[in-house]
Image (cartoon, rainbow, N blue to C red):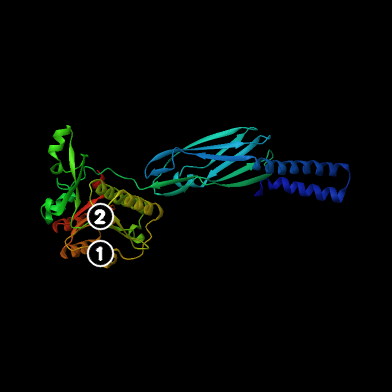
Amino acid sequence: MIKVGNKNFLVLFCISFIYAYLQGGNLPYSIFYALLCIVSFSLIYVLIIGRNIVIDIKFSRDTFYTFEDTEIHTVIKNYGILPVYYIEMHNTVLYELDKSYKGYVFSLDMDANKRLNTKVRFFTRGIYNFGESKLYFKDFFSLFNFEKVIKKRNIIKVYPKIYHLDKFNFSGEDLFNTTIKEKGNIREDYSISDIRKYRTGDNLRNIHWKISAKYGELYTKNLEMVNGEKTNIILNMNKEDYFNEKSEEKEEELIDLTSSLINMMIVRGIKSNLHICNNEMKSFSVSKRNDFQEIMEYFLMHKSEGEEDFFKFIIDNLNRIDKNSFVILITPKINEQIKDNLIYLRRLGYKILAFYSVSSFDNIENVSTLKEMNIRCISFNEAIG
């Protein structure tokens, strides 16, 4: 697309044409033809250089996690025989990632290239196409601006961050072992499926001491459920519940925490169900690594756009959850309604744990009330700290 850059010059050009046409004579026409040559040269120049400029965008890898840093390498190459007096480059995605980004302005000699390095941090998950750029060229007289839109597929996928929760515990005891003990002895509800090396955070009571003594390093028993019960995680992705000045940040925190909890369960051999309250109800049964990757792909593609009331969503899905089973609720805030709903679920017989991200005076008061009802509420910072 070509736009007029110097309108005053073009007005002068039109005036010279009218003057030459009405007055006649060598001088008026000489002025007109001189200006015509300048206009023609400028127009041809921007058309030629626009066709000879290409962009190549490179990065170290195409998969990242939120809050990771990387460097985007952009190479602009001039394949023409004409030097480029003025180039202005803007990348659509860089504007989204860096508020201070204003684009780049530079020049290029003939058959030369320019390498631009930009450091970015991914604060939100999603798919980023760095291949969409806009280039603006000017001629020597700044009469015309030539705009060139380049669309390539230079994709980076950003998944939720996985926090290492190997040492995650509550009141000095592992969350899930505490839950198991409420039902009875571990040996009654679980069976040994195999032996593996000890990982940080594994319950010391599951260490296989005979095997460990034989090989000189710690081995632990892999325990899997016999009765088929699973931990149930219910995630609130209702857009209204995230509506505040830091809604995007709080959403990412809870999605990261959800992913981290499920990852920890897989590492510890704990099966789980994930129920998501979004614009479309979605449930996942998680027992192996492939199931976890399916959840990560879901979070990659979906934001919090739900409109259904969160508690109504829970009630509608209670038939999927066995009575006396363990339920983890993940929601942005513990307001008065959430507090009353959690108490209601507790009275129905469910063992409840809630995670939240928004800190406020009302939250603190409600969390204190729930604690008296033996319902733990844990903030995002406390969970990852």
- Up-down relation of residue 244 to residue 268 (above or below): below
* Earlier residue among tags 2 and 1: 2
Within the image, what quadrant is residue 64 found in? top left
Structural crowding at the residue carrying mark 2, measured as other residues with C-alpha within 10 Å and reported as few (<14), some (14–19) or many (≥20): many
- Residue 135, placed above or below residue 217: below
In the image, 85 versus 24, the foreground residue is 85
Identify residue for label 2. 272
* SS for callout 2: strand
Helix, strand or loop for disc 1: helix
Label 1 environment density (alpha carbons within 10 Å; few <14, some 14–19, many ≥20): few
Q: Mark 1 belongs to which amino acid? A: Arg
Q: Position of residue 32 (x, y in %)?
A: 81, 44
Residue linked to disc 1: 320
Q: Which mark is residue 230?
A: none
- How many numbered badges does the structure rendering display? 2
Residue furthest out toward the left: 185
Asked whether residue 330 appears in the rendered view, the answer is no
> Between residues 49 and 287, which one lies in front from this camera angle?
287
Q: Foreground: 137 or 69? A: 69
Q: Residue at x 38, y 60 (%)?
A: 305
Does residue 18 show up?
A: yes
Most extreme residue toward the right is: 25
Three-letter amino acid code at the position of disc 2: Ser
Residue 274 picture location, percent across and down: 29, 57
